């Protein structure tokens, strides 16, 4: 079965929780999370980060489980640091 999803970069003004809530409320089953380090955008969407893995600590690790609690699968796109 094909899953319909989107990349989180298209919603730069939303938090990760808001992105997942949007996906769930609008019938999406997958979100590709943008998680490269914060910094200057050198190309379209490159400056959008919903999960900063470079600064991730044990308190933020629960964010990895957020999509699954809403029935959303996720993938993570990370640029080399």
Image (cartoon, helix red, strand yellow):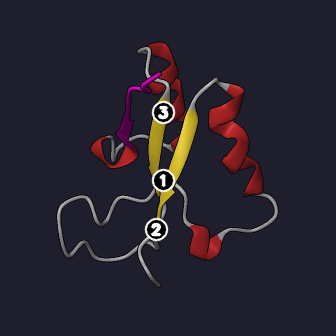
Q: Circle 2 sits in a helix, a strand or a loop, which is it?
A: loop
Mark 2–mark 1 Cα distance, whole angstroms, equals 11 Å
Residue at horizontal 75 percent and vertical 57 percent from the top = 61
Q: Residue furthest right?
A: 58
Between 21 and 13, the residue placed more toward the observer is: 21
* Label placed on residue 70: none
Mark 2–mark 3 Cα distance, whole angstroms, equals 17 Å
- Which residue is tagged 1? 50
Residue at horizontal 68 percent and vertical 33 percent from the top = 68
Q: Is residue 43 above or below residue 22?
A: below
- Which residue is tagged 2? 78
- Residue 55 screen position, x and y as percent: 62, 73
Q: Is residue 11 left or right of residue 24?
A: left
Q: Residue furthest front?
A: 1
Q: Residues within 10 Å of mark 3 (few under 14, many from 20)?
A: many
Lower sequence index among marks 2 and 1: 1
Between 71 and 57, the residue placed more toward the observer is: 71
Q: Quadrant of residue 42?
A: bottom left
Q: Is residue 46 above or below residue 26?
A: below
- Residue 60 screen position, x and y as percent: 73, 57
Residue at horizontal 47 percent and vertical 50 percent from the top = 33
- Which residue is tagged 3? 30
Q: Residue furthest bottom?
A: 81
Mark 1–mark 3 Cα distance, whole angstroms, equals 15 Å
Contact, mark 2 vs mark 3 (Cβ under 8 Å) = no
Q: Residues within 10 Å of mark 1 (few under 14, many from 20)?
A: many
Q: Is residue 77 above or below residue 22?
A: below
Q: Is residue 58 left or right of residue 11?
A: right
Q: Which residues are magenta?
A: 1-7
Lower sequence index among marks 2 and 3: 3
Q: Residues within 10 Å of mark 2 (few under 14, many from 20)?
A: some
């Amino acid at each position: 079965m094909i899953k319909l999803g989107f990349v989180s970069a298209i919603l730069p003004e939303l938090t990760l929780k808001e992105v997942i809530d949007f996906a769930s409320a609008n019938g999406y089953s997958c979100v590709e999370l943008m998680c490269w380090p914060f910094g200057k955008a050198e190309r379209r969407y490159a400056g959008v980060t919903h999960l900063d893995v470079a600064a991730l600590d044990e308190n933020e690790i629960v964010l990895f489980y957020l999509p699954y609690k809403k029935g959303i699968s996720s993938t993570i796109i990370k640029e080399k640091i």
